[in-house]
């Protein structure tokens, strides 16, 4: 009887020791896992990955800015890379023959501008030129104001830029009526009723002489 009681107590003691030992092992494993987790390095994200394509899309064409060639297709510009063609930011000064689908169009200072995403264009004789974002400027002359030509001969062009065609010429002293303003240019009505663009710097406000 006493031996049975002894064995029962021994079994209970061993069972309690086993439970305690198991608990200690579990705590040790959790502590190790927690410590290891704290030592894991957090890697900050790097720059956005560069997009490279193995071949150019069908229908692309080549444009040049200075001596640098680019490939263009539907608003995307590419440059030749070591392992394919790299998508690059639209280069300022590039002239493309067509605008990407979904472009926006608006007029600022009498000049038509176009944009697609963060790329801005203006119309030129050869197509559409990539430009810096246009900035609204205060007009030097009000619409309907008269200005006069301040140099011997002033070219009148079909658009606000030196790359536009010369359509007429006006002479020093001719009076022009301002219809629109652009950065550095005026859209004017000529003495014969025709219209065109002239460089603002070669005009001056019309002075009205007092009557005698």
Image: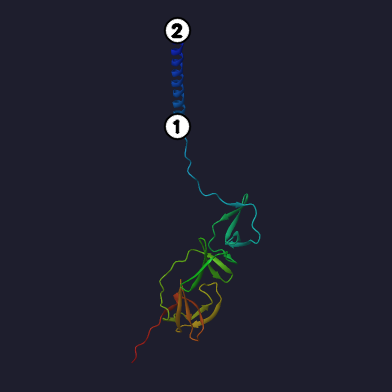
**Residue 142's quadrant in the figure?**
bottom left
Residue 128 in the image: x percent, y percent?
56, 67
Quadrant for the C terminus in the image = bottom left
**Secondary structure at numbered mark 2:** loop
Q: Give the camera-side residue of 27 and 184.
A: 27
Residue 48, relative to residue 140: is it above or below? above
Lower position in the chain sequence, tag 2 or tag 1: 2
Crowd rating for badge 2 (residues with CA inside 10 Å; few <14, some 14–19, many 20+): few
**Secondary structure at numbered mark 1:** helix
Give the image's coloring scheme: rainbow
Residue 193, relative to residue 91: is it above or below? below
Residue 165, relative to residue 209: is it above or below? above
Residue 108 in the image: x percent, y percent?
46, 71
Quadrant for the N terminus in the image = top left
**In the rendered image, which residue does mark 2 sit on?**
1
Q: CA distance from mark 2 to mark 1?
A: 50 Å
**Residue 209's quadrant in the figure?**
bottom left
In this view, the residue farthest toward the top is 2
Residue at 58% across, 69% down: 127
Residue 23 in the image: x percent, y percent?
44, 24
Residue 182 in the image: x percent, y percent?
46, 73
Left or right: residue 166 versus residue 24 is right
Crowd rating for badge 1 (residues with CA inside 10 Å; few <14, some 14–19, many 20+): few
Q: Give the camera-side residue of 90 and 16.
A: 16
Which is more foreground, mark 2 or mark 1? 2
**In the rendered image, which residue does mark 1 sit on?**
34
Residue at 49% across, 81% down: 153
Residue at 44% across, 16% down: 12
Q: Give the camera-side residue of 1 and 17.
A: 1
């Amino acid at each position: 009887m006493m031996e049975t009681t002894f064995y029962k107590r021994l079994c209970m003691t061993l069972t309690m020791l086993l439970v305690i030992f198991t608990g200690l092992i579990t705590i040790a494993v959790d502590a190790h896992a927690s410590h290891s987790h704290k030592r894991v390095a957090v890697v900050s994200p790097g720059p956005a990955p560069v997009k490279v394509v193995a071949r150019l899309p069908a229908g692309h064409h080549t444009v040049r800015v200075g001596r640098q060639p680019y490939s263009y297709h539907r608003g995307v510009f590419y440059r030749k890379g070591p392992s394919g063609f790299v998508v690059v930011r639209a280069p300022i000064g590039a002239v493309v023959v067509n605008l990407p689908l979904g472009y926006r169009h608006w007029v600022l200072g009498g000049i038509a501008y176009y944009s697609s995403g963060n790329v801005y264009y203006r119309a030129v004789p050869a197509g559409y030129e990539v430009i810096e974002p246009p900035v609204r400027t205060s007009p030097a002359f009000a619409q309907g104001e008269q200005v006069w030509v301040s140099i011997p001969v002033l070219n009148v062009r079909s658009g606000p830029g030196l790359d536009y065609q010369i359509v007429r010429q006006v002479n020093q002293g001719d009076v022009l009526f301002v219809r629109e303003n652009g950065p550095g240019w005026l859209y004017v009505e000529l003495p014969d009723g025709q219209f065109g663009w002239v460089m603002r710097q070669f005009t001056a406000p019309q002075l009205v002489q007092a009557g005698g």
